[in-house]
Image (cartoon, rainbow, N blue to C red):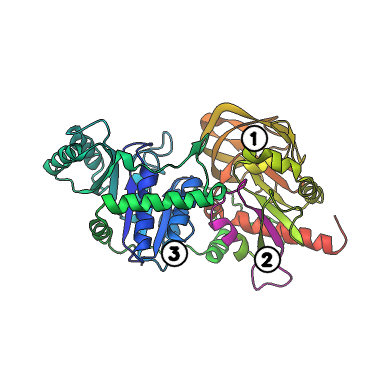
Amino acid sequence: MIDIPRLVVAAPASGTGKTTVTTGLMAAFAQRGLRVSPHKVGPDYIDPGYHALATGRPGRNLDAYMCGPELVGPLFAHGARGCELAVVEGVMGLYDGASGQGELASTAQVAKLLRAPVVLVVDASSQSRSVAALVHGFASFDPQVRIGGVILNKVGSDRHEALLRDALEEAGMPVLGALRRAEGVATPSRHLGLVPVAERHGDAADAVAGMAAAVRRGCDLDALLALARTAGPLHEEPWDPAEALASAAGAPSVAGASVPGAPSVAGSSVPGSPSVRAGGAGRRPVIAVAGGPAFSFLYAEHPELLTAAGAEVVVLDPLRDERLPEGTAGLVIGGGFPEVYVGELAANESLRAAVAGLAASGAPVAAECAGLLYLARSLDGRPMCGVVPGDARMSGRLTLGYRDAVAVSDSPLAVTGSRMRGHEFHRTVLEPGAGSSPAWGFRGAERRVEGFVRGGVHASYLHTHWAGAAGVAERFVVASAGAAGAAGRGGG
């Protein structure tokens, strides 16, 4: 059981200023000396970066689609351990979730799983008394969702604020804050949302400070903290990476799929492979994980799982590092914006050659989205690593949505037939989009094969959350240990 005050910050729709308000709340409470645990509903990588900057703690995602509803509470408890307040930013509108699947992966579902009160951020810029009808509709739509108050955003004047407050008082809904239109804090965006913190750390810190100042001026922090304290105890055991690995070794299902008989992707599916978890025999294999401004998309639980599985995790910045870390036996390249840094990535010829050499040796390489582009022959006409036989370019088309995937080929991540849930989010196109041994086959409306498996390489557009399939991490570490052993014996 954990008993931590907590709030879920939601909105009627995207574009209301939810991220600005949430980040400002986190920073304002942290400035009061509270240990604040930051969380984000859904697959978003960028907002958690701002949350981390506001609180000094890793921003963590709560995704009921990719990890399964049963892990939302444990992952929350893991991130909130030792904190005095938890603030959870919602995704899209309060009741929006996985397309065609009811409340699954919605902010409302996460609020119910966490038994947390909801603060609704409303864009009041084009309404007055109608705000009461809007809020009443959201408050009454699902009686199990407890909306404890409203923060009004983009309020035009004192008179406008008075009209809004009168309407909500008549509806019996507390107003916990009102932010003026002129107090908007500049957070630059581009084709996939806000510019990540890793690309503008100094300016981002200034922006977060501005968000905190606006929240302090416009919000009743004492009332918000009092509301958070009404959440009560949460009967959840905190998620633990080592325990997750142990459970995955015999798990009958994967990635929150909730499908009877679904095959496992546990590391035990590697025949004859010894465990290399911490405390086991032998050296810990070095796994390089790409980071820096071009590759800033990585869930906090991934390196935690790799470490628990026995790896030594070392961060690699492909913009600045000219060689792989000493003894690299495996490489993980997550998402980000390589298209923004394509010139610098192309110019780092020595690292591109080292990555190609590592892949050619048979060592495991896992690449998602931006990582796939980096492994391609070219990106927007500039040379990349040449590991994947495809050429990538920016396009005007947004590919976005959750995916129910099945492994098509054996790889260091999964055995053929394993099910995995993930998320696509990109404006690039890779031609061809799949190799002779594809990585995934997508089910449902998105029926197609996608990605590449070549030797030890698994490269795909699909973002995955390994906490929902912890065996992926152990399988990858086992393969890395094998590669390290082969290198030590003079093999490839």
Asked whether 434 or 10 is in front, the reply is 10
Asked whether 94 or 344 is in front, the reply is 344
Q: Residue at x 38, y 56 (%)?
A: 26
| Other residues around mark 2 within 10 Å, as few (<14) / some (14–19) / many (≥20) | some
The N terminus lies in which quarter of the figure?
bottom left
| Other residues around mark 1 within 10 Å, as few (<14) / some (14–19) / many (≥20) | many
Asked whether 216 or 358 is in front, the reply is 216
Q: Nearer the viewer, mark 2 or mark 1?
A: 1
Q: Is residue 344 visible?
A: yes
Question: Is 59 left, or right, of 321 in this rendering?
Answer: left
x%, y% of residue 235? 35, 63
Q: Residue at x 54, y 57 (%)?
A: 301
Q: Quadrant of residue 307?
A: bottom right
Q: Does the residue at mark 2 contact the one at mark 1 (Cβ under 8 Å)? A: no
Above-or-below relation of 281 to 422: below
x%, y% of residue 17? 36, 41
| Other residues around mark 3 within 10 Å, as few (<14) / some (14–19) / many (≥20) | some
Asked whether 250 or 122 is in front, the reply is 122
Q: Nearer the viewer, mark 2 or mark 3?
A: 3
Label 3 sits on a secondary structure element that is loop
**What is the span of residues highlighted in magenta in the rendered image?**
277-305
Above-or-below relation of 452 to 118: above
Q: Amino acid at mark 2?
A: Ser
Numbered badge on residue 450: 1
Q: Give the CA distance from mark 1 to mark 3.
A: 35 Å
